[in-house]
Image: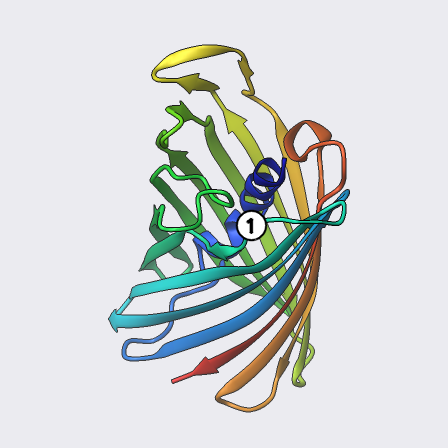
Amino acid sequence: MIKKIMLAAALAATASFATWDKFPVLEAGKGQAKVGLGYDMQGDYSGLGLYAGVRYTVIPNLELGTVLPYTIFTDYDGVDGPDGLGNLPIMVRYQFMPAMNAFVDAILPIGEEELNDDGFGIHVGVQYSQKFGMIDLGAEAGLLISTEGDDEVSPPWNLNVGAEADFVLGGPVTPYVGLDMNMYLGEYTHDGDELPWSDASGTLGLWLTLGVGYQVNQMISLDASFGLGFGEDYYGEDTPMSIDFNAKFNF
């Protein structure tokens, strides 16, 4: 049960971990490190995790990055669950136009099997960003494809389409709101054969994020956000919720 909920939570967080953000890549020779703490809740389940990541633009318009998550604890109705490393995304973004990025993320199954899908994943897509007065808008469309793991079960493809609006107020505080849609495409299969209960195609989930950023100085910024999911068929009967705090360091 815990693994099932954890996998649902991982899908909900796909936009957070698979791509760094929905905005232009950093300037050439610039980088950013990020450390954060996240708390997830869904029904009788709760979990606390840490993550650390880094991104760097190696040549103009080409950014490389990764984020390593670690689950500190999980709990289901008072029973301790598994902890350990999460799967590792290797992220590549290329800004081919001033307002558009293309990205490819390889998700390596190095994490604790009780918490993570043990199949290899690839997430590909495009991003668009533009400023509209005080609103800095970033949007993304992507497709996540995962291979079968040791259980020989292949999940359906996952289509994600989302946007984030940052409200630039002219000071150090920047509120933002994001909405991401996730939808399954296809069926679950076992060793290549369709399962009788597997028709998940078209199952839809929405993830709403409300957050605020604070620019401490040129080098350091802080971020706090709250997210929740809508869509019983996608996320399950209980509403998933997530609280996140992170700090970013420019170099």
Crowd rating for badge 1 (residues with CA inside 10 Å; few <14, some 14–19, many 20+):
some
- How many discs mark residues in the rendered view? 1
Give the camera-side residue of 17 and 81.
81
Q: Is residue 98 left or right of residue 235?
A: left
Q: Position of residue 218 (x, y in %)?
A: 50, 90
Q: Is residue 162 left or right of residue 145?
A: right
Q: Residue furthest left?
A: 59
Q: Which residue is mark 1?
A: 82
Residue 149 vertical position relative to residue 192 in the rendered view, above or below: below
Q: Residue at x 58, y 43 (%)?
A: 6
Residue 183 vertical position relative to residue 127 in the rendered view, above or below: above
Q: Residue at x 58, y 51 (%)?
A: 163
Quarter of the image where one finds residue 223? bottom right
Q: Residue at x 75, y 32 (%)?
A: 237
Q: Residue furthest top?
A: 196
Q: Is residue 243 left or right of residue 185?
A: right
Give the camera-side residue of 31 and 121.
121
